[in-house]
Amino acid sequence: MDLITVTGAAVSHLEVGVRALRNRTSFVIDAVRAGERVVLNVHGEPVADIVAHHQRSRWLSGAQLHDQLQTRAADRELRHDLDRLAGQTLEER
């Protein structure tokens, strides 16, 4: 019988076969809505993770993005490092 398997002592994720997904779709959807990650197995092999859909971040206009990038640069030396490395191959390092 192709049923849903809970892995781990504490529920870390659910595993479900294709037949169980077809037969118990509402159960799987409820689990995903509750925050569980469901692993879809085909012939006993994991092929996909079913996870809750998250709302996209709001889009920034070009001007807003430019302002954000100006004030939140991750590494001021990155440009220098990239210029120095440009054109080099792995053997040249």
Image: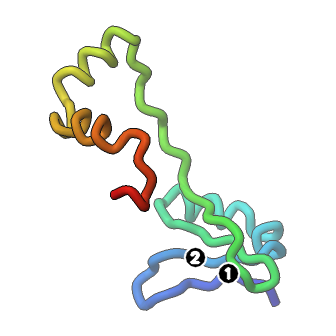
Q: Is residue 27 above or below residue 93?
A: below
Quarter assignment of residue 87: top left
Local SS, label 2: strand
Question: Badge 1 local density, few (<14 within 10 Å), some, or many (20+)?
Answer: some
Where does the image place residue 17, in percent across and percent down from the top left?
75, 77
- At a point 80% along the width and 72% down the height, the residue shown is 18
- At a point 67% along the width and 81% down the height, the residue shown is 4
Q: Is residue 86 left or right of residue 84?
A: right
Identify the amino acid type marked 1: Ile
- Nearest the camera: 56 or 24? 56
Q: Is residue 24 above or below residue 92?
A: below
Where does the image place residue 34, in percent across and percent down from the top left?
49, 60
Query: Residue 14 shows which numbered tag?
Result: 2
Q: Is residue 11 left or right of residue 17?
A: left
Quarter assignment of residue 69: top left
Where does the image place residue 80, in percent across and percent down from the top left?
22, 35
- At a point 30% along the width and 16% down the height, the residue shown is 66
Say which quadrant the N terminus sits in: bottom right
Query: Residue 4 shows which numbered tag?
Result: 1
Residue at the extreme front = 92
Q: Is residue 44 left or right of residue 61?
A: right
